[in-house]
Image (spheres, rainbow, N blue to C red):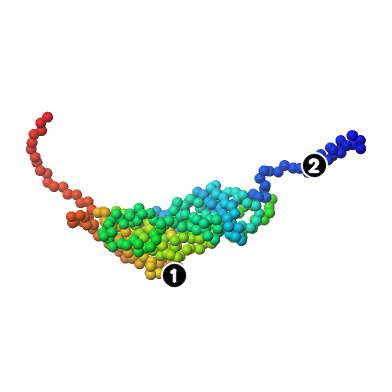
Amino acid sequence: MTKRLYIVLLAVIALAFTAGCHRRPLEELEEKIRIRIKIDVKAVPNVTTGIYNEKIPVPDLTTDMMRVLLYDVNSKNLLTQSFVSNKEYDEEGNQVFTGELSISYGDYDLLVYNFDTPTTQVTAENNELNILAYTPEISSAMRSRMLGGAKADDTNLNIDDFGTILYEPDHLVVAREHDLDVAPHDTVVVIQTTATTIIDTYYLQIHVEGMQYATAATAVISGLAPSNHFGVNVRTDDPTVAEAFDLCKSTDDNIPGENKDVLCAVFNTFGKIPNVSSNLFVTFNVVDTAGNLQTYTASLDTVFQTEDAIEHHWLLITETFVIKPPVIEGGGSGGFQPKVDDWEEEEGSITL
């Protein structure tokens, strides 16, 4: 082989290698997955629909971040996770989150929930079957506030009768996609899912006489679910728990007569446990103008069976809580009652 032929042959080989190469992006397109999460909260009783009393505030259902968990379909163990905070609104006013997932093709179980709940807490997220949403037990400070600072012998209220008392949960919006098949692809794949709340919201109300004597009020309600294994949407029910929340002063024009005063609240819960009865009750705790605690306990067994409760989540107690004029030290009643005596004239001299 002549030297010239050798050089030509090397050039041909070089050209062949050059033709076989091309530029590729740093990010492999076939592994690019986008997710679109719509938050559907347009039919939440007592929050966005079926509001009984529009004079009091309702829970906030907006969120700023979603957590995306991807699980193995067989072991149910966590494979990877992402956080999505890019939010806009669609033409119907729904919150919509979009973001990218760093996954390849394969089969997955997808679980999404809002990650900005101060009271609702999440644990055991490494397994889809075990992941649990719950709220902690109320603080000693709140327990004291519910007792109004009264001494134990000042009231017949036994707060321990309720067992464990928890804070009410924030709304947790959840989306699930089981056996999600992501096939090999050479274009961007978009996973679309819709998140709805796993929390129930109720309206509670009782008629009141003597509202002018109340300075603060709370309620404790029993017979509720303490948590939810929301990977499979199964509420826990053993043991049942109680829940504590603040009450509002308001009025209800549907009540006959001149006095339409009510104590009421819109409260969240993981839910009433089905078929539980005989231990469903609520205690209303009012601190009067003298700093004393006055309480009233009502059964909820029949209230939960009413059409209002079943269809609308309205717990309307037909009994009346009579707040008595407060008794102050040394006798008498009724908070601060100023009295002005007649003027008395005095004469004297002041030395400067």
Mark closest to the chain's N terminus, 1 or 2: 2
- For image coordinates 51% across by 49% down, the residue present is 65
Q: Which residue is mark 1?
A: 275
The three-letter code of the residue at mark 2 reads Phe
In depth, the one of 139 and 109 nearer the eye is: 139
- For image coordinates 33% across by 54% down, the residue present is 145
Q: Residues within 10 Å of mark 1 (few under 14, many from 20)?
A: few
Q: Which residue is mark 2?
A: 17
Asked if labels 2 and 1 touch by Cβ distance under 8 angstroms, the answer is: no
The number of discs equals: 2
Residue 190 in percent (x, y) is at: 62, 52
State the separation of the CA atoms marked 1 and 2.
75 Å
Residue 28, visible in the rendered structure: yes
- For image coordinates 8% across by 40% down, the residue present is 346
The quadrant of the picture occupied by the N terminus is top right
Badge number at residue 162: none
Which residue occupies the extreme top position in the image? 352
- For image coordinates 54% across by 47% down, the residue present is 86
Work out whether 289 lies above or below 273: above
In depth, the one of 74 and 66 nearer the eye is: 74
In depth, the one of 228 and 54 nearer the eye is: 228
